[in-house]
Image: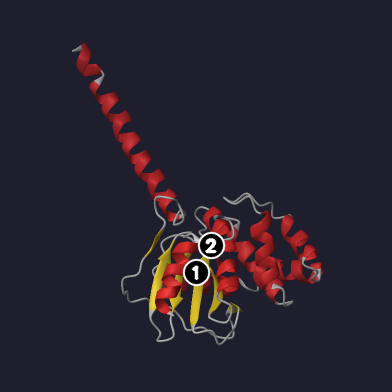
Amino acid sequence: MEKNIYLVPVSIIIAGALIGGGLWIGLRNLGSAGAPGAIRGEEKPKDISMRPISKDDHIRGDAKAPLTLIEYSDFECPFCKRFHPTTQQVLKEYNGKVRFVYRHFPLTQLHSKAIKEAEASECAAEQGKFWEFVDRIFEITPSNNGLDPGELPKIAEFIKIDVKKFSACLASGTYAKKVQADLQDAINAGAQGTPYSVLVDAKGGRTPISGALPFENIKAIIDSKL
């Protein structure tokens, strides 16, 4: 009888550990497309539904470049922070051959601050300083929801835009719908974590790239499309 007394509590502990572990893994995978175990470039043909590039997009590089790298990103994702210099290297190495498009995919369940940071970048764009904002926030954020919201006006000051106008824009929520539209587009395109990118070639072919791939891997994919 004494042995049976412990059977139920032990079984509950084991079941709880399994459920807890599964939940932790699920959350980890959601925001860890760039984790070492999940880094991958998917080169198999895949039907990717995403909105066409327009004047409302943020485009860096030659607008007439034959290849377009579209990234769905989260300002509080550590792997997005790691991947950002890679995108800059791509533009430098493939000047005139690749253009870069940034779209928002804030993982709000993990990074509650990311959505306002995304809106803040749009407020900076209103004053013509989107890319300066993006470069700066990735430079200073500790990631994983660690950036103090009080740093956003300081970024605005650093990139030399009107801080009062920026702050009023951010408080108004003017760009909340635009950020949500990007988020939905990311889901439609097959994004399951960040960073998630799609390389669009001259014929309209789309190659999904999941995770913070090193430059050498991105280069191999780009070279195969030129």
Residue type at numbered disc 2: Pro
Colour treatment of the image? secondary structure
Residue appearing at x 57%, y 82% in the figure: 96
Crowd band around label 2 with a 10 angstrom C-alpha radius: few (<14), some (14–19), many (20+)? many
Circles 1 and 2: CB atoms closer than 8 Å: yes
Amino acid at pointer 1: Leu
**x%, y% of residue 165?**
78, 72
Side of 34 relative to 139 (left or right): left
Q: Residue at x 69, y 51 (%)?
A: 148
Q: Secondary structure at mark 2?
A: loop
Q: Can residue 33 be seen in the rendering of this structure?
A: yes
Which residue shows up at 31% across the image and 71% down it? 44
Q: Which labelled disc corresponds to residue 93?
A: none
Residue under circle 1? 183
Q: Residue furthest top?
A: 2
Q: Is any atom of residue 173 visible in this view?
A: no
Q: Position of residue 204 (x, y in %)?
A: 40, 84
* 186 relative to 169 in the view: left or right: left
| Tag of residue 106 | 2
Left or right: residue 92 compared with residue 129 = left
